[in-house]
Amino acid sequence: MSDAIDIRLATQRDALQIAEMSRTLIEVGLGWSWTPARVIRSLQHPEVNVAVARCGQMMAGFGIASYRGGEAHIPLFAVDGAYRRKGVGTALIQWIEETALTAGIGVIRLEARLGNSAARAFYRALGYREIETVPHMYRGVEPGVRLAKDLWVKPGSQLSNR
C-alpha cells in the first residue's frame, strides 16, 4: 500500500462518514441504526473510544470500542473494501487491543453475522474465538456469532489453544 495507515481518535467531523460506512458496509439489509447522532453519542461517551484509520486523506476504516467492567466490547468495526487485505483492519484491531491493555482490560468481545465468513476468518486469524452462535441476533432476522479474545494469554501458550 502506498499510503501509511494513520490511526487516531475520531472527531465529530468523522461521525457522518462513519455512519455512512456502517450503513453501506455493515447494516445492509438490517436498517440503519448507527446514524450520525448515535456515532456522536459514542464519541461523547467517557467509556467509549471511536478510532479511525486513514490512508492519506481517505478514511479506510473505523472501530468503536466500549470499556466496562473489566472487558472491552467492539459493537461496530468496518474497513472500506478498497483497503481490505492491506493491513488496515489488523492495525485498527491492534490499536483497540493496545488501548484495552493500557486500561488494564484483558478481554475483548465482538459479534459478526454468521454468514460473514470473511469477517469471522479475519477475527479468528487475530486470535478471536467463536464462543456462541445466536439465532436472530441481528434485528431478529439474521443469526450471529459472538467472539472473544483473552489479551493476557500469549499466542502459542497452552491456554491460547483451548
Image (cartoon, grey):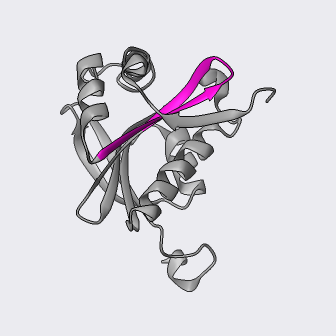
In the rendered image, which quarter is residue 31 located in? top left
At a point 57% along the width and 75% down the height, the residue shown is 154
* Residue 21 locus on image (x, y percent): 44, 19
Q: Is residue 159 left or right of residue 4?
A: left
Does 16 sit left or right of 101 as displayed? left
Quarter of the picture holding the N terminus: top right
Q: Is residue 79 visible to the viewer in this orientation of the structure?
A: no
The stretch drawn in magenta includes residue 4 = no
In the image, is residue 129 above or below residue 35?
A: below
Is 153 in front, or is 67?
67
Question: Where residue 147 appears, x then y in whole percent?
Answer: 39, 56
Residues drawn in magenta: 48-63
Query: Is 62 colored magenta in this rendering?
Result: yes
> Based on the displayed image, in which of its 4 quarters is residue 22 positioned?
top left
**Res 86 → quadrant:** top right
Instruction: Give the main secondary structure, helix, strand or loop, of the magenta stretch.
Output: strand
x 57%, y 47%: residue? 122
For the view shown, which residue lies furthest in the left direction?
140
Of the pair 161 and 110, the residue shown nearer to us = 110
Give left or right: position of 2 versus 20.
right
- Residue 127: where, in percent of width, then height? 54, 61
Seen in the picture, residue 80 relative to 124 is either above or below; the reply is above
Task: Provide residue 82's location: percent of width, then percent of height.
Answer: 65, 21
Q: Residue at x 53, y 29 (%)?
A: 61
Question: Is any part of residue 161 visible from this angle?
Answer: yes
